[in-house]
Image (spheres, rainbow, N blue to C red):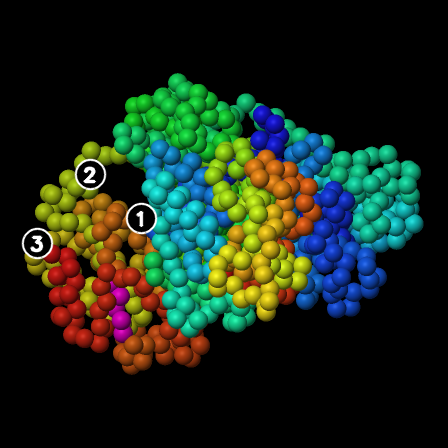
Amino acid sequence: MQIPVVRLLTCGSVDDGKSTLIGRLLVETDSIPYDTVDTARQVRRAGSNIPAGEIDFSLLTDGLEAEREQGITIDVAYRSMSLLDGRRLIISDAPGHEQYTRNMAVAASRAQISIVLVDATKGVRTQTLRHLTICSLMGVQRVLVAVNKLDAVGFNEEIYLQIKSEIEKTLTRLDLTDVHFIPLSALAGDNVVQRSTQAPWYQGPTLLEAIQSWQPTQSASATARMRVQSISRADDFRGVSGTIHHGDFAVGDEVKIFPSNKLAKIGKIISGFQEEQVALETSAVTLVLEPEVDATRGDLIAAASEDLHASDRFNAHLVWFNEDALIHSRSYLLISGPTQTPVIVTKIRHKIDVNTGEQNSANTLVMNEIGEVEIATNQPLALLPYKQSREFGNFILVDRLTFQTVGAGMIRHALRRGENITYQAYEVDKAARESAKNQKARVIWLTGLSGSGKSTIANTLAKRLHALGMHAYVLDGDNLRMGLNVDLGFTPEDRAENVRRVSEVAKLMVDAGLIVITALVSPFEADRQRARSIFDDGDFIEVFVDTPVDVCISRDPKGLYKKAKDGQIPNFTGIGQDYEKPSKPELILDGTADTEANTKAIMERLL
Amino acid sequence: MSTELEILKSLESEAIEIFRETAATFRKPVLMYSIGKDSSVLLHLAKKAFYPAPIPFKLLHIDTTWKFKEMISFRDKVVADDNLSLIVHTNQEGVANGTNPFTSGISEYTRIMKTVALRQALDLYEVDAAIGGSRRDEEKSRAKERIFSVRESGHRWEPRAQRPELWRTYNPKLAPGQTMRVFPLSDWTELDIWRYIAAENIEVNPLYFAKERPVVMRGSQIIMVDDERYQLNEGEKPEMKRVRFRTLGCYPLTAAVESSATSIEDVVEEVFQVKLSERATRLIDGANEDSMEKKKREGYF
């Protein structure tokens, strides 16, 4: 397949002459308006020693005020130019410093080609290896190592060869196969667009030639896939809309819908305002299925013959973006195209030192770190290895409270234990058990500070329900920590795991038809939301027992506040750790009020 | 298919995907319809994205009351022809205070009648996603903007704290107070816009085509005198010149270019040849080097 729009990533820092290189590439291919070039002749940064009237190429690419003031690149900038064969080249200009690894990942995520700049006067530095590592991880196909500033070393071939051999040693480990080394001078204009007369020893392509000669490698015999973005409904019309990848679909093709596994035929293809016989790869279309099987946003439509290998466990590379470190066992939202599902990172296998490629043990990832992790998704997904498919092998992680994009992942492979577990549906189900008990099974999730009165309310509530002949069970945080959760402490990670286990147990009990009352501090909103997410709508009743901290301290039924104040208990909620109040609880109880009144309020909610 | 058409097809498919994502994930999106060529392309793409269903959101036009007359008549015709749902919003407080492009100062006028007006409309109609026709090739700070670009409360753009945006996996989630701006034409160039208009036979405003129009000179800029409110210098008389516009906005602030391009094909040829950036004809952008970034931080599109 021909790719008419090619994307190029540039890696390097201002010191390496990156902006100058891109600026020259754009100016010499006539891709910049004349008035913009004139501005770059006239405007000067503070301390610039570029002679008046010359173009300061770097001014053409640094866009933000802060960037111009500081003479650095902060965020990715995108620029378009035309290649000589008519294809479009979109240049993603990414900052090169280590604290901007995440921005580089953004720019690399769609690039097929990258330019890695090496300053010939300085030789190979750690940043070069970092740039190559990120290119490899993000699936960049062709790497052009631009050995820049050769004019400053007298176009010395030895220096070029030295740099080349040093980098070549690392390429096998990095799994990069299409790499070219180009000696050039961005400042003097040698071997960028114009061939150099100064380096007769180099016979290879100029930078522009090496960009232009790239063609996509034909992918192995994959079959077409489309993820459903939306359902299109009009009079007598119902279609599923999305973008086609990995191949073409034609009218009459047999397809299956995942996860329902229903089969259908493609009855019609709508592309724009027209009906077509074929939906070509990369086109955005609407398919009419026959019969009209159910499909919703996020579902996958694949050739009926494709073996989907769906799984809910994957091994993946993960780049961490957020200032708050990754928390193992905390629930995040996974998004891949239109597919969304809650996900937990179950294991951090190791982190990758981006400067050396070494694998180091780790129990978290902080901002700009990259690691190999295992994830567990709430529902099975038909993701593919990233090396095989960028479209179906990528995902991002979103924080469930701030909604920030906190990480980006590349699937390495599905884990067997996830593939082989399929949910077994039983005929005696929750509804049957509920009706035998003549009650609606639910979980009452009491949350609040230690000493807020959760256990007392839980106990009173359980007695009241029992007296009415209902079947209820209390899961008490402290009691569970003597058995099921004996291995857990009070760090944010352990608290997340504590909540996860209790919510899973509660879910089993609700499924068994019971009314479950949990009494856990559960201080973090993200953990509670994750707990909520595994229950059916309406089955999770979050009750916030709101008691001022000084009241809890004066009660201190277990003497814990005193210990925490004495420094004997770290991470104690209210003293060393914050309690995040629920944003939308079903019920808020005044913890200083009468227990009877509070119990009554919950009973009213239940009956 | 020629490479040129393949590029357009590829840009079109991505834009359609972005429209569908927006419609599927936001509660109340609007399409920012500013009547110009980019808006015409945006509207065409929106129709294609949802066909045979109608466009599932409203159009929003911020009317400063200083738009070209032909812009308003064109807008009303388009809305009527396609049976679209349009919201027009004007900052009435600005009008009451007599804010105008002559005596208020260009940047103050723009802030009140465009930026503040836009913020008012987005708040009033509880818009959570505003789809705009901005392109990365227009201006340096736009070159750095995401396709799904978060605005903090008060519609502020925080250029240094943009969400990472990878692949074509977009994060549409908003925290309280945040809103989204969506730019389906991010990767398009001015020439792409015109080639697409030609290829798809999209109707665009007649102001884009050369015609004898009454103009005056302001420095090197040619300004059309569109109505009697224009403040002429003493003894000054508009003269007729054959001009057209590269961008459309408030008429006293939008310079014309001398041209003989009367068809879309002529315009494509002219844009292909011309070597000045398109926003050079916008008086408001030149105020100082970083003016676009400043405006955007305040909530401008």
- Identify the element where label 2 is drawn: loop
Mark closer to the chain start, 1 or 3:
3
Residue hosting label 3: A469
Query: What stretch of residues is rendered in magenta?
Result: A543-547
Residue hosting label 2: A429
Q: Amino acid at mark 1?
A: Ile
Q: Is residue B38 left or right of residue B2?
A: left
Question: Eyeballing the image, is A311 above or below B111?
Answer: above
Residue drawn where x is 61% and y is 50% of the image = B241
Asked where in the image residue A97 lies, by quadrant, the reply is bottom right
Residue hosting label 1: A534
Mark closer to the chain start, 2 or 3:
2
- Identify the element where label 3 is drawn: loop
Of the pair A352 and A323, the residue shown nearer to us: A323
Q: Amino acid at mark 3?
A: Gly
Q: Position of residue B285 (x, y in %)?
A: 59, 60
Asked if labels 3 and 1 touch by Cβ distance under 8 angstroms, the answer is: no
Q: Chain of mark 2?
A: A
